[in-house]
Image: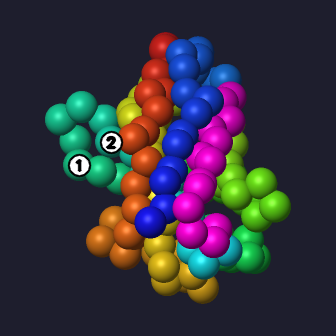
Amino acid sequence: QVQLVESGGGLVQAGGSLRLSCAASGRTFTSYAMGWFRQAPGKEREFVAAVSWSGDKTYYPDSVKGRFTISRDNAKNTVYLQMNSLKPEDTAVYSCAASSRRYGTSSGSRDYDYWGQGTQVTVSS
């Protein structure tokens, strides 16, 4: 079992920045690739970013590429999501997830085994 706890969400104006953190506990953190997903009210869950177990591979959808950066600190069992140039359409609950497919950077939610509860990000115009 892996427990994931997100933090760092909040209210920010358009154009601003936030950094989300996801602290993991339980099984060995390096056994997992990590991802971030988001879900806005009335919309389906959307993939945001993923990083392989070592941090050498990352993957982003076009909607956030160049604005968001995922990283991990394996010594701290933590994955981060740096979000810059935020837009109102980035408003959502952001959740981190752990995938036992540790070498990959999957965008599919079904490839993730454990999920955090999420943190709210609200971007005002």
Q: Is residue 26 above or below residue 13?
A: below
Q: Position of residue 119 (x, y in %)?
A: 46, 33
Residue 108 visible (yes or no): no
Q: Are marks 1 and 2 in contact (CB under 8 Å)?
A: yes
123 to the left or right of 18: left
Question: What's under tag 1, amino acid-wise?
Answer: Glu
Where does label 2 land, which residue? 39
Label 2 secondary element: strand
Between 5 and 64, which is closer to the camera in this rendering?
Answer: 5
Q: Rate crowding at label 2 as few (under 14), some (14 to 19) or many (20 or more) other CA atoms within 10 Å.
A: some
Name, please, the residue furthest toward the right.
75
Q: Residue at x 54, y 40 (%)?
A: 6
Q: Residue at x 63, y 72 (%)?
A: 28
Tell how many labels: 2
Where does label 1 land, which residue? 44
Between 86 and 78, which is closer to the camera in this rendering?
Answer: 78
Q: Position of residue 114 (x, y in %)?
A: 40, 62
State the extent of the magenta-drawn residues as a range.
17-29
